[in-house]
Amino acid sequence: LLNNPSASSQEAYDAFIAQMNKRAFELGMFDTNFVNPHGLYNANHYTTPRDMMLLALAAYGVPVINQTASSKTYNVNNKDGSTDVLRNTNQMLYDTIGEFYGIADATPNPYKTDLPTAGKTGNTDEGGRTFVFNSQVDGADVYGVIFKTDEEGIFSQSKNVLDDLKNNYEFKTIEDIEPLVLKNVHFVDDATIPLNELDLQAYLNDEQYENIEVDYELDETYVDPETMELTQTVYPGQQIGNLVIRSRDKVIKDVPITVQNRIRTKNWTDFIYDNFFVIVLAILIVLVLLYLYMKNRIRRKYARKRRKKSTKPRVS
């Protein structure tokens, strides 16, 4: 990171922590601050379940990380010929209690799941037991984050969630969502904000699906939520709000609404565009009136000439 072989250990450490926070910000982890690389307690070292979800999405998307986190054991061959066995602390991977603890106990593991699961556990006195896991249900990736519980809680809750998803939920697409159409948009720009179909999919049970409600929550910095009018020019990549999908007041999904192309507010050219036919009609009326006025004026002029000519005395 420093490109400086003579850097001190502290300088390298600080550079690494800075890179951790930089990457966290890039992932959208705005409620996270790292001060060490190991996670031991520090008052200034903190995160949230949502931010850990974002980190899990990035980390478990790397095949080698997912494979490692879903492996039961790893053998380390030492130089003296001995072997140390590293054992995964994710109890959901093991068939028996003995397999998990490395002892002769054939008691079935109550937290075993047939679903492929990669997980990372954590444990501090202040934070309690934590678990961030990734699994697949019906071919779809599922991510879970559990904070501040005990060893039994992290595995029982995770297994219950996965079993419930497998037995009672389906990956469904939420239909009939009206696209977001902005007002006060320059006539050459597209006022419709497209939605990605993948953003409209979620695991839902039948009751949730039947009670789906969808709302646009727009950033007043860019859009007047009452009139839906654009208040300033927005550019590709800017987020102007969220599509919030709820069922019985529970948020199912919160989808960022991001602008794909530049969208400008109306200017004087839009007045011409919006009122083109009125303006053309007004011009035609003016031209007709001008024509009639000039025609009438010319007619009166010739009428005066004829009158003068008719009243001129004749010479015999």
Image (cartoon, rainbow, N blue to C red):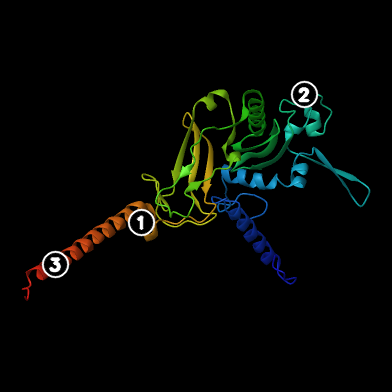
Q: Residue at x 67, y 38 (%)?
A: 133
Q: Residue at x 72, y 69 (%)?
A: 3
Q: CA distance from mark 2 to mark 3?
A: 123 Å
Q: Which mark is residue 306?
A: 3
Whole-percent x, y for residue 15 in the image: 66, 63
In this rendering, the label closer to the viewer, 2 or 1: 1
| Mark 2 crowd level (few <14, some 14–19, many ≥20, 10 Å Cα) | few
In this rendering, the label closer to the viewer, 2 or 3: 3
Q: CA distance from mark 2 to mark 1?
A: 75 Å
Which amino acid type is shown beneath numbered disc 2?
Pro
Choose the circle earlier in sequence order: 2 or 1: 2
Which amino acid type is shown beneath numbered disc 1?
Phe
In the picture, measured across the screen, residue 164 lies left or right of residue 231, that is right
Give the position of the C terminus as an image quadrant: bottom left
Q: Which mark is residue 271?
A: 1
Which amino acid type is shown beneath numbered disc 3?
Arg
Q: Which mark is residue 108?
A: 2
Q: Is residue 57 above or below residue 313?
A: above
Q: Are marks 2 and 1 in contact (CB under 8 Å)?
A: no
| Mark 1 crowd level (few <14, some 14–19, many ≥20, 10 Å Cα) | few
How many numbered discs, if any? 3
Q: Residue furthest right?
A: 81
In the picture, measured across the screen, residue 313 lies left or right of residue 175, that is left
Q: Residue at x 35, y 52 (%)?
A: 277
Choose the circle earlier in sequence order: 1 or 3: 1
Disc 3 secondary structure class = helix
Whole-percent x, y for residue 304 in the image: 12, 67
Whole-percent x, y for residue 94 in the image: 78, 31
In the picture, measured across the screen, residue 84 lies left or right of residue 11, that is right
Whole-percent x, y for residue 7 in the image: 71, 70
Q: Is residue 280 above or below residue 97?
A: below
Disc 2 secondary structure class = loop
